[in-house]
Image (tube, grey):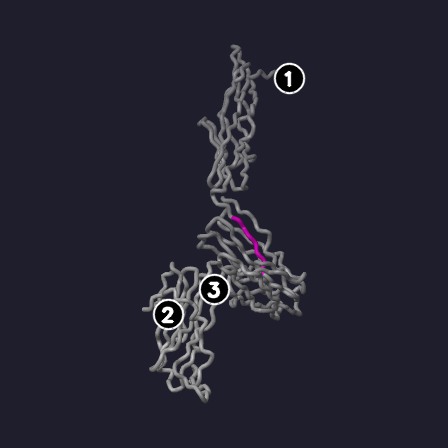
Amino acid sequence: MHAPTKTSLALFFLAPFFLLSCKGKDGDSATPSADSECDKPYADAGSSRALPLGSKVAIDGSNSSYCADHSQDTITYTWLFENIPSESGLNDSSFADNESSTATQIEFIPDVPGEYVVSLRLTDPDNTSEPAYVVTTVTSDDLSPTATCGGDQDGQQGIVSTLDGSDSSDPEGAELTYIWTVASVPECSKIRDFSLFDHETASPSIIPDCAGAFVVSLVVTDGLHESDPAFCTIDASSENSPPFAEAGAGDVIPSCAESSFQLNGWGSYDEDGDQITYQWTVHSTPEGAETYGFDDDTLPDPLFTWDLAGEWTFLLQVHDGTTLSAPDTVTYTVNGSGNNHAPSASAGADVTITTTAPCSRDESYAWTCGECEITTVDLDGSGSSDPDDDLLTFTWSSTDELLTFSSTETAITTAAFPPIVAAYGVTHSSSYEFRLDVEDCSDSDNDHITIVYQCTGYYDYGW
């Protein structure tokens, strides 16, 4: 193995001006001079260059030549590092296909900035050429990538046009990220950036929704730098007016809602009055969502069942039998349990009920009174509310076991008081406590109401 040295670059500037009676790489004989002859091969390692760190360096020695009396099979190419940066870990074994009779080209990847001087020597059975030197200057600056979007093209309304950014490149060979946007559209178009299918790939597609020029831009990034934008125009023509998809306004679904909701694409239309068909697709889901779907994705208002809270985005396209509309998107946000707000219970205001019962007396002047007439009262918890508009459950209760309810699980119920026998001239007063509990899917609240029931006996004079 040849060890890299700090060999003077003076040899780099010395090269024969010509070779007489030599054979090129294709085996063609050069025209010999009358007073000279070829005595050894001639090495040509190409031109020096400057590249950023991380680039692959390819050196081509195929322009070298050898004497006509030797065949290609007898020529050996020898590549050596003559000088490398002191911090570099490369050596001659870092070359691909080194010291092979077919190694007219070699490659290596610099590992630190600096100057890498490589020499090439050709050897035939009799002699070795003078060395040819090539200098590669490696810098640590990362260069910006270049975006190419494939050129302008003709398109047709309602028909998919595909763009091509695969020729975009990065000087360092870094992996590229593609950022496609819609730069301009005709006034008749509703296409926006989200209308580009596969917009994060090298080959997105677009469906023009009316006739006119659609300009799309591409920016690529290598993770450090963005390219200048490249612009491509799709000139779309059409005789049929395309339909328009309207996916609705979206909604926020409360955390206590059922695991399904209904979409609304009834606003879609066709300017020609053609009958349209519908196609819904799921555009994006919350991370981790696994089980979900439509009851029928061809309905204008399908029911969608979800399995995870978060943002769900849907895409709607409609077709008039000839042309497919541009897509329209809508987002529904399903609140998770962490976003739930507790309900507020309202059992109503405290009430005092005053009732009477007639009394009479016998010959011995002893008083006999009946029972007070009002023995029931309506309780109303319909003033309870939930900030998320969740469906509430109601539970009425009382510590008095003698009280009964027409229902304990409705917002409005009727409570029946135990019968009270009046006493003449005496007001009997009883206080009853009622409790109302309301609950949504995860939180609850309660409220109390006090009803005072007064019963007084009186003498009915019959007036």
Q: CA distance from mark 1 to mark 3?
A: 119 Å
Contact between labelled residues 3 and 1, with CB atoms less than 8 Å apart: no
Whichever of callouts 2 and 1 sits on the residue coming sooner in the sequence is 2
Q: Which residues are magenta?
A: 327-333
Q: CA distance from mark 3 to mark 2?
A: 20 Å
Residue 328 forms part of the magenta stretch: yes
Quadrant (top left/top right/bottom left/bottom right) for the C terminus: top right
Instruction: Label 1, secondary structure: give it.
Output: loop
Q: Locate residue 105, reporting x and y percent.
A: 41, 74
Residue 242 forms part of the magenta stretch: no
Contact between labelled residues 2 and 3, with CB atoms less than 8 Å apart: no
Query: Is residue 101 positioned above or below 137 on the image?
Result: below
Q: Amino acid at mark 3?
A: Leu
Q: Nearer the viewer, residue 290 or 404?
A: 290
Q: Amino acid at mark 2?
A: Leu
Q: Which residue is mark 2?
A: 80
Instruction: Label 2, secondary structure: give it.
Output: strand
**Quick check: can you spot residue 461?**
yes
Q: Amino acid at mark 1?
A: Trp
Q: Which residue is mark 3?
A: 51
Q: Locate residue 108, reporting x and y percent.
A: 40, 67
Q: Which mark is residue 463?
A: 1
Query: Is residue 299 positioned above or below 260 on the image?
Result: below
Whichever of callouts 1 and 3 sits on the residue coming sooner in the sequence is 3
Q: Locate residue 151, reporting x and y percent.
A: 58, 69
Quadrant (top left/top right/bottom left/bottom right) for the N terminus: bottom left
Query: Is residue 31 positioned above or below 14 on the image?
Result: below
Q: CA distance from mark 2 to mark 1?
A: 134 Å
